[in-house]
Image (cartoon, rainbow, N blue to C red):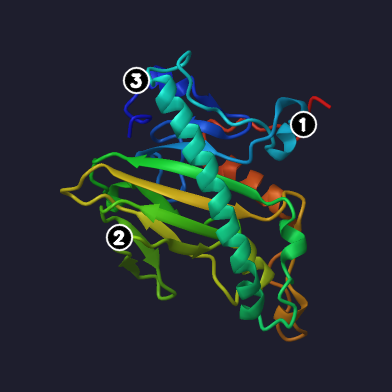
Amino acid sequence: QVLFSLPIDQKISLSDSTLQRGYTRFEEETLDPINQQCRGDTKEGYYIGNEVDVKNMDTAKLRGPNVWPSTEKCNMTDEECNQFRKIMEEYRLEATKVCMNLLPYFAMAVESDDRQLFDDFFKDPSTFVRLLHYSSEPSSPEEGIFACGAHSDYGMITLLLTDGNPGLQVRLNNENWIDIPPRKGAFVVNIGDMFERWTNGKFRSTVHRVLTPRVGNERYSVPFFFEPDFDALVKCLDVCCSEDNPPKFPPVTAGQHLLNMYGKTHADFCHSAEDKSTN
């Protein structure tokens, strides 16, 4: 809340649109372009990914340093800046451990005898903590106004922390939407696009959105996105396809899928396919 309460010029100074790190402004992201013709999501955010020093930076693969608040760029104190970085780095590492521990259960879910089925795809996973602040502006789907437009997540697993405010909804197979009420002390866990592709659609990537109620409050949430290695080739598992059930999705690297989706949804994303590493 301290971070998001900073003046807008200070928040914008904490942004890197090439690596997709740091601050993203209100309405910069449009997650459901078909139904959001006029305005983007009524939320602002802050991306924190794998910390890579400048000498090993590779912008083609979104590898590089994070943008951290500093007293030179914003009104936060040294103590607040240091505490922010410490908490975010510790949380990202602990959330990564949780997701790594879940991988054997994903192998069990596809009835594989190999509990390490996915291990080779997660030797250097891409991981992102994203801090989100939703305005109190009521959503109006009929007018194309969404706190967060309908979408699925791009990786393997999402762990979502929410505050006590409602708004999150999940779409069922019958196209109806159901509310997912906040539950203290628990994560909301989403399956992402990569697992849907690996399993040929047997396990569906969770389509979800956020609607701010007519009489609503500002809302905060913290999704953690767990993605395969950037260069991991994701294609249908042998156990999930057959002559009668051929692969439904073409092979794609996890990184290319991520870049494709960022390009479609983030107005300020300035990625180049050219490797701009300093090596």
The tag earlier along the polypeptide, 2 or 3, is 3
Q: Is residue 48 above or below residue 160?
A: above
Label 3 packing within 10 angstroms: few (<14), some (14-19), many (20+):
few
Indicate the quadrant containing the C terminus: top left, top right, bottom left or bottom right: top right
Find residue 273 and report its image quarter.
top right
How many marks do you count on the picture? 3
Residue marked by disc 3:
7
Do the numbered discs 3 and 1 sit on residues whose CB atoms are within 8 Å? no
The tag earlier along the polypeptide, 3 or 1, is 3
Find residue 227 and report its image quarter.
bottom right
Task: Indicate left or right for 208 with 253 as reference.
Answer: left
Q: Identify which residue is drawn at 54% across, 54% down.
A: 95
**Element at label 3:** loop
Q: Residue furthest left?
A: 215
**Element at label 1:** helix
Q: Residue furthest bottom?
A: 244
Disc nearest the viewer among 3 and 1: 1
Residue marked by disc 2:
182
Residue marked by disc 1:
56
